[in-house]
Image (cartoon, rainbow, N blue to C red):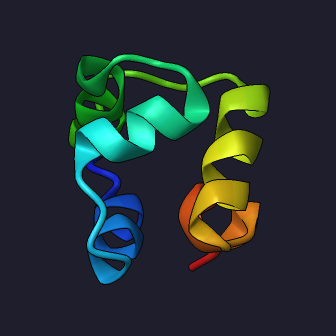
Amino acid sequence: MKNLKLKAARAALDMSQQELADKVNVSRQTINAIEKGDYNPTINLCIAICKTLNKTLDELFWDIS
C-alpha cells in the first residue's frame, strides 16, 4: 500500500526524497520504495524517519482506521 502520509509529511516540510534519505542514511530509492509501498522499512528506519519529519509512528506508518 502506498504511504501517502509519509509523502505528504515530507512535502509539507518542502523536503525532497534525497534530502530525507540523506538525513536517515538510506538511498533516495529506498525512500521512493517506501512511499510507493514496495518496501517495508525496519522499525529503526521508521523511527529515524519519524524523528526527522517530527511525526509519530502512528501518524506515518500505522493504519489505525
The quarter of the displayed image where residue 45 is located: top right
Q: How many marks?
A: 0
Task: Name the residue at 39% across, 21% down.
Answer: 39
Q: Does 43 sit left or right of 50 as displayed?
A: right
Q: Does 10 sit left or right of 23 as displayed?
A: left
Q: Does 42 sit left or right of 44 as displayed?
A: left
Q: Does 37 sit left or right of 59 as displayed?
A: left
Who is closer to the viewer here, 6 or 25?
A: 25
Q: Position of residue 9 (x, y in %)?
A: 41, 73
Q: Position of residue 61 (x, y in %)?
A: 59, 55
Task: Name the residue at 26% across, 44% down.
Answer: 17
Task: Name the residue at 41% across, 60% down.
Answer: 6
Task: Name the residue at 26% across, 49% down.
Answer: 2
Quadrant of the image containing the N terminus: top left
Quadrant of the image containing the C terminus: bottom right
Q: Position of residue 52 (x, y in %)?
A: 63, 57
Q: Position of residue 32 (x, y in %)?
A: 23, 33
Compared to 49, does 32 lie above or below?
above
Compared to 31, does 3 lie above or below?
below
Compared to 40, does 32 lie above or below?
below
The quarter of the displayed image where residue 43 is located: top right
Who is closer to the viewer here, 52 or 9?
A: 52
